[in-house]
Amino acid sequence: MKIYRVLIGREKMLYAEVNGSFYRLDGGDAIDVLRKYASSKTLDLGRRVDENNVDLSRGIIDGGRITTPFDPFEVWGAGITYHIARKRYSEEDVARIRDKTIYELVYEAARPELFLKDTGRRCVGYMEPISVRSDSQWTLPEPELGVVLDGSGEVLGYTVVNDVTARDIESLNPLYLPQAKTFIGCCSFGPCIVTPDEVPDPHSLNIEMKIIREDDVVYEGRTSTSRMIKRIPILIEYLTRDNNIPDGTLLMTGTGLVPGSDITLIQGDIVDIVIGGIGRLVNPVVKL
Ligand code: DO4
Ligand code: MG
């Protein structure tokens, strides 16, 4: 099952996609629906939506516009979770400790990098604008598998996330990470949440990202979640260790695509991310 949230006038309504058909869900929020579905495997489906009123490429369901599938209470990021050429982590111009870059040290360590990205206030959904900070000259999208968790760390579903990052500010000094990671429009996710029964192996999903500028593809990359070296159970174990996360926490599982310093997002770009079996997340870029 896939859960979408749609703006109908000023109201946000939930819809479920089951076997290719769309149904309105009456009341509740996505996390309540997902918790009920996780425990009983049942769902009260409402009215079926006429298929002529669904156009996912334009983000339209039942005549309304798809937005974020829920309001996360906390969004956490994980970093350096993918197998990427070792060179990549050692050559970046970032802080060094004991002759290694801070990225290399995390790459080798058992403990993952985890950081609090947002409380959800700065997150945007499908086709809503993500941002480049006014004081950043090098900002990159990070296409990541998102995991929606309940308060005990159980997986309620999966989504597509873009962990937009001011890479120049991140590189300057590790103590600037919160400024590199958290600002207006720093995170997009959606278009839906997919329940775990539809994702038999979250470590075998293809991820593709394009940056489109005036009809040209200026960056294209692909990877797979099979290349994760710090996998989802480990990330959840560290995230919930001595830490009481709220129901409806969104965990970004790190990026496996790291475009170089020859590309940056600029005003008017479109970032298009597809994760196989989960969905397509498209966002225009604005410069603040
Ligand atoms: O500290 C760097 C951030 C890493 C990150 O966000 C990622 O690997 O996805
Ligand atoms: Mg990231």
Image (cartoon, helix red, strand yellow):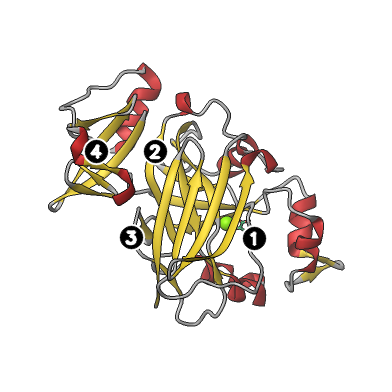
The image position of residue 245, as x and y in percent, is 47, 43
User: Quick check: marks 4 and 3 in contact, CB under 8 Å?
Assistant: no
Front: mark 4 or 3: 3
**Residue occupying image coordinates x 64% and y 51%:** 256
Distance, label 1 to label 2, CA atoms, is 25 Å
Asked if 163 appears above or below 30 in the picture, the reply is below
Report the quarter where the C terminus lies: bottom left
Name the disc covering residue 14, or none. Answer: 4
For this view, does 210 lie left or right of residue 35? right
Along the line of sight, which residue is nearer the eye, 161 or 109?
161
Distance, label 4 to label 3, CA atoms, is 18 Å
Query: Which circle's residue, 4 or 3, is located before the other in the chain?
Result: 4
Query: Which circle's residue, 4 or 2, is located before the other in the chain?
Result: 4
Query: Which circle's residue, 1 or 2, is located before the other in the chain?
Result: 2
**Residue occupying image coordinates x 33% and y 48%:** 57
Query: Which circle's residue, 3 or 1, is located before the other in the chain?
Result: 3
**Residue occupying image coordinates x 87% and y 68%:** 99
For label 3, the crowd category at 10 Å Cα-Cα, with few meaning under 14, some 14 to 19 and many 20 or more, is some
Distance, label 1 to label 4, CA atoms, is 34 Å
Front: mark 1 or 2: 1
Distance, label 3 to label 2, CA atoms, is 17 Å
Judged from the image, the secondary structure of the residue bearing numbered disc 1 is: loop
The image position of residue 217, as x and y in percent, is 52, 64
Q: Which residue is mark 1?
A: 258
